[in-house]
Structure formats: C-alpha cells, structure tokens
Image (spheres, helix red, strand yellow):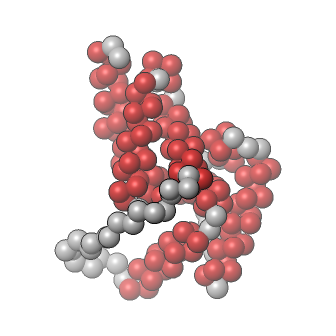
Amino acid sequence: MHFDHQSEFAEFVAARSGSLIRLAYVLTGDQHAAEDLLQTALAKTAGRWRKIRSAPEAYVRRVMYHEQVSRWRSPRWGREHTAASLPDRPETERPDEIETRVTMQQALLALPARKRAVLVLRYYEDLSESEVAKIMGCSIGTVRSQTHQAVTRLRELIGRPVTLEA
C-alpha cells in the first residue's frame, strides 16, 4: 500500500472504528468475536483500499456481514464461549432501562442470523432499505419482509409491543 493510502486508511480506522466495533458487537453478540470480525474486515479492506477508498465504510459493513454469515454457517461456529466479566463502574442506568436493554439483547440473540442482521443494519445502523439490500445481497422486498418477520418475532419473545424507529 502506498504511503498516502496508508495514512488515509489509518485516518479512516481511527475515525470509524468505534462505530464499526459497535456494529460488529451487535452482529456477533460477543466483544471478543466482534473484535475478531472487525479486524478481519479491516484487513480485507486494507488490501482493496485503493479501489474502495471513496466509500470504505459501506465496504467494511458488507465484509463484516458476509464474514459473520460465513461464521454462522461454519460447523465450528459457536463451539468457543468466552466468559464475560463485569467492569467495576457505578450504575448509571435506572433498573428498568437495564432490564429493557437485557431483555431486548436476549430477544435479538434468539432471532435467526439474517433477521437479526436486517434489524441491526436497518435500525441500529440507521441504513435505508436499499442500503441494507445491497449489503445483504438481496432485494428491497426481502429486507421489508425479513424486517416485518423479525419485529413480529421480537414482539412474541418479549411479550409486549416493540417499536423501532427508522
């Protein structure tokens, strides 16, 4: 990679890695797996930087989604489990907010991979239906139906109305 391209890539990583690691976490449900996913996606991005540097974030998102789908399909996926430890920090959220967040996270993790990915890209990343369709390699109609089915399933899992903002 040319020196100018290296500095552009480094600036991109510094500016967008926070947002990208959050997306990776929501896709994987595990901090360590999210870090691995993002690292893999950035390594692939670095190799194609010269061609994709005009819109690198969309490329990284697409790579992350496809990498995660490949991991879900792998027979080895899910064999390793990491133990999470809680950091020592004061409670800043109200108990009802924590309960809602935990309930939603559990419900999201119970969804099939594609439906969870549609919700993450559509509502967490605030992408349009056409952007989600492009990333996932499907039609806009598929994004709409997967979104509808996912929200319906979330309502069933949670047992109360779910409202998502688009």
Look at the picture and state if 97 lies above or below 65: below
Nearest to the observer: residue 71 or residue 19: 71
Instruction: Give the quadrant of residue 99.
Output: bottom left
Q: Is residue 15 left or right of residue 143?
A: left
Total count of labels = 0
Q: Is residue 162 left or right of residue 94?
A: right
Residue drawn at x 56%, y 56% as measured from the top left = 75
Nearest to the observer: residue 78 or residue 65: 78
Residue drawn at x 37%, y 59% as measured from the top left = 31
Look at the picture and state if 154 lies above or below 60: below
Instruction: Give the quadrant of residue 96.
Output: bottom left
Task: State the residue lying farthest toward the front.
Answer: 75
Image quadrant in which the N terminus is located: top left
Nearest to the observer: residue 122 or residue 106: 106
Residue drawn at x 43%, y 57% as measured from the top left = 25
Q: Is residue 27 visible?
A: no
Instruction: Give the quadrant of residue 93.
Output: bottom left
Task: State the residue lying farthest toward the right.
Answer: 141
- Residue 80, given in percent of the width and then of the height, sits at 41, 62
Q: Is residue 13 left or right of residue 100?
A: left
- Residue 118, given in percent of the width and then of the height, sits at 64, 55
Nearest to the observer: residue 33 or residue 108: 33
Task: State the residue lying farthest toward the left.
Answer: 88
Residue drawn at x 70%, y 60% as measured from the top left = 147
Look at the picture and state if 139 lies above or below 152: above
